[in-house]
Image (tube, grey):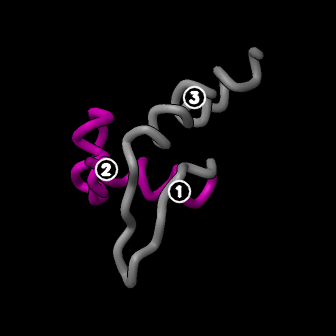
């Protein structure tokens, strides 16, 4: 069985943040998201890999690497 697609609200809850950072990460940090009509959808495996690679790190944390 394949993994289901999550909405912005669901991925925000999964990550423990509000929706605003999710939209900012899509725009500015390359968060893996797929546009289906007017809606953004996510696969948790893709988002997990993005987070582990440092995609969600704050600017200060990114500059330390």
- Element at badge 1? helix
- Residue position for label 2: 2
Question: Between marks 3 and 2, how big is the CA–CA gap?
Answer: 28 Å
Q: In the displayed orientation, state which residue is furthest to the front.
A: 1
- Tag on residue 26? 1
Q: Earlier in the sequence, mark 3 or mark 2?
A: 2
Q: Position of residue 30 (x, y in %)?
A: 62, 51
Name the residue at 61% across, 28% down: 54
Q: Split into 4 quadrants, where in the image is the C terminus?
A: top right
- Tag on residue 57? 3
Name the residue at 37% across, 54% down: 20
Q: Which residues are magenta?
A: 1-28
Q: Residues within 10 Å of mark 2 (few under 14, many from 20)?
A: few
Name the residue at 48% across, 58% down: 33
Q: Earlier in the sequence, mark 3 or mark 1?
A: 1
Q: In the image, is residue 40 part of the stretch drawn in magenta?
A: no
Q: Position of residue 22 (x, y in %)?
A: 41, 51
Label 3 vs label 2, nearer the camera:
2
Q: Position of residue 36 (x, y in %)?
A: 40, 77
Residue 60 falls in image quadrant: top right
């Amino acid at each position: 069985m394949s993994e289901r697609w999550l909405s912005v609200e669901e991925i925000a809850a999964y990550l423990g943040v509000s929706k605003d950072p999710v939209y900012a990460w899509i725009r500015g940090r390359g968060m893996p998201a797929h546009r289906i009509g007017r809606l953004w959808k996510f696969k948790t495996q893709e988002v997990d890999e993005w987070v582990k690679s440092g995609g969600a790190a704050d600017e200060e944390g990114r500059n330390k690497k």
